[in-house]
Image (cartoon, coloured by chain):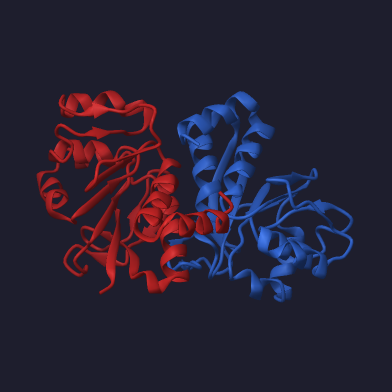
Chain colours: A red, B blue
Amino acid sequence: MTQNIGILLFDRVEELDVVGPWEVLAAWTQQHPGDGFRVATVSSGGSPVTCAKGMVLTPDYSFSSAPAWDVIVHPGGEGTEVLVKDEEHLDWVRSAAPLMTSVCTGSLVFAAAGLLTDRPATSHWATLEFLEVLDPTIEVRPDDRFVDDGDVITAAGVSAGIDMALHLVSRFAGSSRAAEIKHYIQY
Amino acid sequence: MTQNIGILLFDRVEELDVVGPWEVLAAWTQQHPGDGFRVATVSSGGSPVTCAKGMVLTPDYSFSSAPAWDVIVHPGGEGTEVLVKDEEHLDWVRSAAPLMTSVCTGSLVFAAAGLLTDRPATSHWATLEFLEVLDPTIEVRPDDRFVDDGDVITAAGVSAGIDMALHLVSRFAGSSRAAEIKHYIQY
């Protein structure tokens, strides 16, 4: 049974929050299909999204056409300012996948959805204080590149998504596989 | 006078080769418009391209609709296997911009176009030998993250494009500006 990793796209998502993890996870799943994972992009409506810096990305799936997700990568970006108040989106976040991971301000959406209550977490350095505003029970970890709390993983800002994705490869396929992908992308 | 930086898109371009530099250059140009630069994406025909790992990116311009470029970023990826033999593309490369920069196997296209004759250069670690096959006069630098030879800059594999783009910010707007963008993307 192949496990599905979905990377969420939305309007004003931060470009590198998406493509850092994408590069790592797609390189891994395509070079090692026997590991039993695949990765795809998904947006609410399935239409192309315009990112925070203006790049246009076309998702593979809409919420309704997507497979069941085993892992979700929720990127950050300016668009999260809308998502933290979007009850429909927060409902989706609460049941989107058994393993939820975020990059950058994606963790603010997790906080707003209640996913981080009484848990350690991180975010982009400029928004760490908003984690506590959204949920004072969060144990904010300002010095971690990413925080793995079992079924929720949060990463720090933008490029930290690359490290978090390499950690996912390590967690699912071992540290030597992760080292191989890191070498491939010369990171 | 605004100077235009163009990032080339083509079929089977490597995703992070594009979006690493894009993130750095777009963050810089949008947060500091007074520095006098802007960045956009361009492809030959202007239609969406399917990248090496399957992501679909929509360019801002075609070759015919694009402004005059002051700087080109030529990414790498599997698609360069076609481009190194595409005389029309090599002609474009020879006159695309006064400053030509590459990421990963983009330098193989520069080598095929004759841009690297008697110059130091680098590429993805797995393709360094092809630089010499394409042009034996190239001084291959396997240990450099990027090589700045004045009007041609080549970067190593995939994520090294982020370092090369930060170097461009430093070259055009100073090292403190580059440090600010590096901090913003938490790299």
Residue B150, given in percent of the width and then of the height, sits at: 80, 43
Q: Is residue A12 above or below residue B187?
A: below
Q: Nearer the viewer, residue B170 or B155?
A: B155
Judge left or right: residue A113 versus residue A49.
Answer: left
Q: Residue at x 30, y 27 (%)?
A: A128
Residue A9 percent across, percent down from the top left: 30, 54
Nearest the camera: A174 or A95? A174
Q: Is residue B113 above or below residue A51?
A: below
B23 with respect to A34 (left or right): right
At 60% across and 48% down in the image, what residue appears?
B161
Q: Is residue A26 left or right of residue A122?
A: right
Residue A180 location (% of width, % of height): 53, 59
User: Is A138 in front, or is B57?
Assistant: A138
Position of the N terminus of chain A, as image quadrant, is bottom left
Number of numbered callouts drawn: 0
Q: Specify the quadrant of the image occupied by residue B10.
A: bottom right
Q: Let me know if residue B32 appears in the view.
A: no
Q: Quadrant of residue A42?
A: bottom left
- B10 to A126, vertically: above or below: below
For image coordinates 58% across by 70% down, the residue present is: B78
Residue B118 appears anywhere in the view: yes
Query: Could you tell me residue B52's position as x and y percent?
Result: 51, 68
